[in-house]
Image: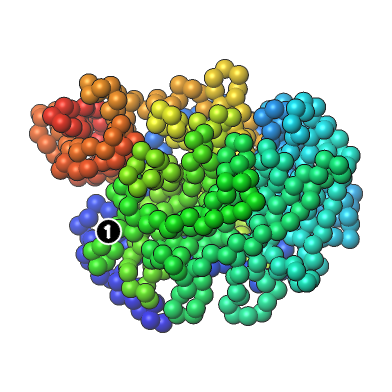
């Protein structure tokens, strides 16, 4: 009751204090979205995807680029629960074999039960698929929520000899009783199944071993579960840490030997109910050769508490055999994030609030640097009783700003971290109670499902998500597939691309998966594997049959990087500014300032008479990409110049206000 009273009081104060602001900031609470209720064993609800908080967004898409896309129906499942959460890794592949794989519940046209698990795969860019490989074929086991990947033995060039690897939980239709781990060569030989019963001596109560499935060149497969007794009837169920399942390939038996590691993060606790401040079970990723790996959890570390959920990082330098918790880092110090945050009520530095409301993904680049992609909000207070509250910047269309970042290790920064603003979603998350996708026990929430993919060199990063055009609806009921690329070497981004708007597939792209591997198109471009899932009978009943589609044509050209009008200055040809986005603009517009090293820079906006209509006094900007936002709603329609001045030299670009 105390928190509800605070929320009401502060909201009233906020509405009056910010009435004259360009951004009508409103206090909201994530409703402790980082605490999931996993008690239910009804198929579909144990995922914790009961999203009840609006998914804010801010900057409209810079460029509604149309790609030539097509949807290829390649497989099916008995119900939606293959594709329920983006944390599962269903879509993967292998560069050497030009292979794309999709792990899912069995096709509904096949005999057997819905609990069988298969891997479908394509070797021609998604045009045709082999759907014959049923890996988990034991009809006495009710397997659910699969994740999977591909292991290709060194030197192998024959697709038949590669291995599909899978994992997930098992139910007896009343509780979660065990977990499955399996593998098979793609030609159907050397099929192996292993079942682990929960609660046995020496076996953790493992929740959903499906999170962040990855296979490394070290002949290992990794998937995260959690030591979490989801069959408990306690009001607050103890979360006892990560269970990292590691499968090591056994070349004598042509299968994987699985073992488990227990990784325990000392999360801070909520003083109101002593529950732990964590937001998801974790993600795991490795570098190109599989030697260096990272595990990331979002939460408050009780040892080094920075008062908001932030990344807590574990690192391995021995191919995942051992893991060491990294020193805590207060991400409030990342300069590229700060301009997009609202300061806490007591005036301290604005505090980032990392959240999985629109998904989370991690990757390791060509320099072995970790990248963390998720939505970042603003912490509201430093009061121990109010740390679950966030600020949200309300837009004119009634929605709220939801900035999505790639926060990454950067040795050129004094604190070792940098960030890239990917985009902002302008529509609200669809709550379970209002969703147009339903089950017999309630609705299924719909979020943005932000995911990352990298090219073979790991120098190009691609971010893909699902988002509704806010002119159609301010909720994410009618999503398109949207994406953006970032060249880690040049520091140049692409425009935001909407791949399905203006096509026959517009506004109907649910439950996307993004492959962790982006493939070359042979002409200097990049094809990002993406799947969507749709209701087979049009009912949007999550317990009814669904069809899986491969979205062919999610493509970025080499020329897309820097195509947003980057212009170079005379200062060593290294300082650059981009074209503002959106352009024309009516509310807010942003541009990028790229610096070779940290510098003092001033920003001004002038009309065609040379009169300054807006300015940002000189301040320190970090090396790399810096996002600068200009409010436009008080400017008259017309053409303006925005100018960056550094050491007496100036760079300018035109912008249009409508």
Provide the residue designation for mark 1.
Answer: 349
* Quarter location, residue 547: top right
Q: Secondary structure at mark 1?
A: loop
Q: Is residue 10 left or right of residue 309?
A: left
Which quadrant holds the C terminus? Answer: top left
Foreground residue among 308 and 246: 246
Q: Give percent across and percent down for residue 405.
A: 43, 46
The residue depicted at 46 percent of the width and 75 percent of the height is: 270
Q: Is residue 86 left or right of residue 24?
A: right
The residue depicted at 39 percent of the width and 46 percent of the height is: 417
Q: Is residue 259 left or right of residue 640?
A: right
The residue depicted at 76 percent of the width and 34 percent of the height is: 153
Foreground residue among 258 and 138: 258
Within 10 Å of disc 1 (Cα), the crowding (few <14, some 14-19, many 20+) is some
Q: Give percent across and percent down for residue 524.
A: 54, 19
* Quarter location, residue 512: top right
Q: Give percent across and percent down for residue 307.
A: 38, 66
> What residue occupies the far bottom of the structure in this picture?
1
Which quadrant holds the N terminus? Answer: bottom left
The relative height of residue 567 versus residue 634 in the rendered view (above or below) is: above
The reply to whether residue 440 is in sight is: no
> What residue occupies the far top of the structure in this picture?
523
* Quarter location, residue 493: top left
The residue depicted at 39 percent of the width and 35 percent of the height is: 62
Q: Give percent across and percent down for residue 537.
A: 73, 49
Foreground residue among 183 and 63: 183
The reply to whether residue 491 is in sight is: yes
């Amino acid at each position: 009751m105390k928190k509800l009273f605070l929320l009401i009081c502060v909201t009233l104060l906020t509405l009056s204090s910010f009435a004259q602001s360009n951004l009508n900031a409103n206090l909201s609470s994530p409703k402790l979205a980082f605490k999931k209720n996993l008690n239910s064993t009804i198929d579909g609800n144990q995922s914790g995807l009961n999203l009840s908080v609006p998914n804010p967004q801010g900057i409209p898409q810079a460029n509604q680029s149309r790609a030539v896309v097509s949807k290829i129906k390649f497989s099916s499942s008995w119900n939606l629960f293959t594709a329920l959460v983006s944390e599962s890794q269903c879509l993967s592949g292998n560069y050497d074999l030009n292979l794309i794989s999709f792990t899912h519940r069995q096709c509904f046209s096949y005999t057997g039960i819905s609990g069988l698990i298969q891997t479908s795969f394509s070797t021609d860019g998604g045009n045709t698929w082999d759907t014959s490989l049923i890996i988990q074929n034991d009809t006495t086991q009710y397997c659910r929520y699969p994740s999977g990947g591909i292991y290709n033995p060194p030197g192998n060039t024959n697709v038949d000899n590669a291995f599909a690897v899978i994992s997930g939980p098992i139910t007896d239709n009343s509780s979660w009783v065990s977990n499955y781990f399996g593998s098979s060569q793609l030609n159907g030989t050397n099929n192996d199944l292993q079942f682990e019963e929960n609660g046995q001596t020496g076996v953790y109560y493992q929740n959903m071993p499906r999170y962040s499935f990855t296979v490394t060149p070290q002949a290992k497969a990794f998937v995260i579960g959690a030591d979490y007794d989801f069959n408990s009837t306690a009001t607050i169920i103890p979360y006892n840490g990560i269970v990292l399942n590691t499968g090591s390939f056994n070349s004598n038996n042509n299968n994987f030997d699985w073992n488990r590691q227990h990784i325990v993060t000392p999360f801070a606790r909520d003083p109101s109910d002593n529950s732990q401040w964590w937001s998801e079970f974790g993600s795991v990723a490795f570098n190109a050769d599989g030697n260096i790996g990272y595990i990331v959890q979002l939460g408050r570390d009780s040892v080094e508490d920075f008062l908001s959920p932030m990344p807590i990082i574990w690192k391995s330098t021995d191919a995942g055999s051992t893991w060491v918790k990294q020193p805590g880092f207060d991400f409030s110090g990342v300069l590229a994030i700060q301009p997009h945050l609202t300061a806490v009520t007591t005036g301290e530095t604005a505090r980032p609030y990392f959240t999985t409301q629109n998904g989370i993904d991690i990757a390791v680049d060509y320099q072995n640097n970790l990248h963390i992609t998720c939505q970042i909000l603003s912490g509201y207070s430093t009061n121990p009783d109010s740390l679950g509250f966030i600020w949200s910047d309300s837009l004119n269309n009634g929605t709220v700003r939801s900035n999505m970042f790639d926060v990454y290790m950067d040795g050129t920064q004094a604190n070792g971290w940098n960030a890239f603003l990917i985009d902002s979603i302008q529509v609200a998350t669809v709550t379970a109670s209002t969703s147009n996708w339903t089950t017999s026990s309630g609705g299924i929430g719909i979020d943005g499902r932000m995911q990352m993919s990298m090219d073979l060199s790991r120098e190009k990063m691609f971010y893909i998500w699902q988002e509704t055009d806010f002119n159609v609806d301010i909720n994410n009921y009618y999503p398109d597939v949207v994406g953006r690329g970032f060249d880690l070497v040049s520091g140049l981004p692409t425009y935001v691309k909407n791949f399905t708007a203006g096509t026959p597939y517009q506004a109907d792209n649910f439950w996307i998966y993004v492959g962790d591997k982006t493939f070359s198109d042979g002409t200097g471009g990049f094809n990002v594997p993406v799947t969507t899932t749709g209701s087979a009978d049009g009912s949007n009943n999550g317990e009814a049959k669904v069809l899986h589609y491969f979205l062919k044509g999610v493509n970025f050209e080499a020329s897309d990087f820097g195509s947003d009008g980057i212009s170079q200055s005379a200062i060593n040809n290294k300082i650059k500014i981009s074209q503002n986005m959106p352009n024309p603009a009516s509310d807010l517009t942003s541009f990028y300032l790229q610096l070779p090293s940290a510098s003092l820079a001033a920003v001004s906006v002038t009309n065609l008479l040379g009169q300054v209509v807006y300015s940002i006094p000189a301040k320190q900007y970090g090396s790399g990409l810096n996002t600068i936002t200009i409010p436009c709603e008080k400017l008259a329609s017309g053409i303006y110049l925005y100018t960056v001045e550094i050491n007496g030299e100036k760079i300018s670009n035109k912008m249009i206000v409508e």
